Amino acid sequence: AHYNLRSVKERPDPSSETALFWHIPKSGGTTAKQIYQCIGKTLTIRIGVDPRYGHDQSDELVVFKPIEGKDWKTVNVDTVSEKGILRAEEMGLVASGKADIIFAMDVNFASSHLFDRLNKGRILSIFRHPVDRLASKFYYLQSATWERTYRPEWADMSIL
C-alpha cells in the first residue's frame, strides 16, 4: 500500500494526488472536517451515504450538498467502514477526482484499496496525547446519548 502514497519528502500537488485524512478518534478529526467544509472542499464522510439524501444506493458517484446554504459537498461513499471503502474502490472514487479529501480511520485498508500507482494519496492527520484523548472520550461519553457506547452511569463522575 505504501507504493500508492506520496512520500512526505515530495512537495504536495493536489492536481496529482488525493488527500487521505487519518481520523484518529478524539484527536481533532471532527475539527478538521469542519475546517475543510468551511473552505468549500468535497469530503467523503458518512453523511454521504445517509438514506435521507437518496444517493446511498446509487451505483455511480454523486457529489452533492447535504446542507443547503453551505459551500461544502460530499460524495455518496462511506470511507470509514471497510465495506464502504470497498464500495468506493469499486466505484472508482480516487480516479474520478470527485473528492478533495478522504476521511478514514483505517488508513492501511483505505490506501490499499482506494489508491494505486497512478492515483496516489497523501496521508495527513492530527495527533493528540493519548491521556488527553482518553479524558476527552470519557467526558464525551457522559453526554453523547446518540453513541452506542454512551455511558449515563458516568454522568456525575470526574477523573480528578
Image (cartoon, rainbow, N blue to C red):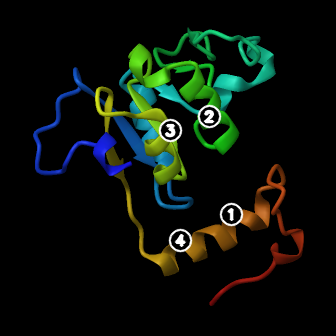
Label drawn at residue 140: 1
Residue drawn 51% across the image and 81% down it: 131
- Residue 4 pos. (x, y %): 33, 40
Label drawn at residue 6: none
Instruction: Say which amino acid is labelled 2.
Output: Leu
Label 1 secondary element = helix
Q: Residues within 10 Å of mark 4 (few under 14, many from 20)?
A: some
Mark 2 and mark 1 residues within 8 Å of each other at the beta carbon = no
Marks 2, 4: nearer the viewer:
2
- The mark nearer the N terminus, 2 or 4, is 2
Would you name the residue on which mark 4 appears? 133
Label 3 secondary element = helix
Would you name the residue on which mark 2 appears? 86
Q: Is residue 41 above or below residue 34?
A: above
In the drawing, does residue 14 fall left or right of residue 87?
A: left
Label 2 secondary element = helix
Mark 2 and mark 3 residues within 8 Å of each other at the beta carbon = yes
C-alpha separation, residue under disc 2 versus residue under disc 4 = 29 Å
Instruction: Say which amino acid is labelled 3.
Output: His
- Residue 24 pos. (x, y %): 51, 58
- The mark nearer the N terminus, 4 or 1, is 4
Q: Can you tell which quarter of the image residue 118 is in?
A: top left
Label drawn at residue 113: 3
Q: Is residue 11 above or below residue 67?
A: below
124 vs 156, nearest the viewer: 124
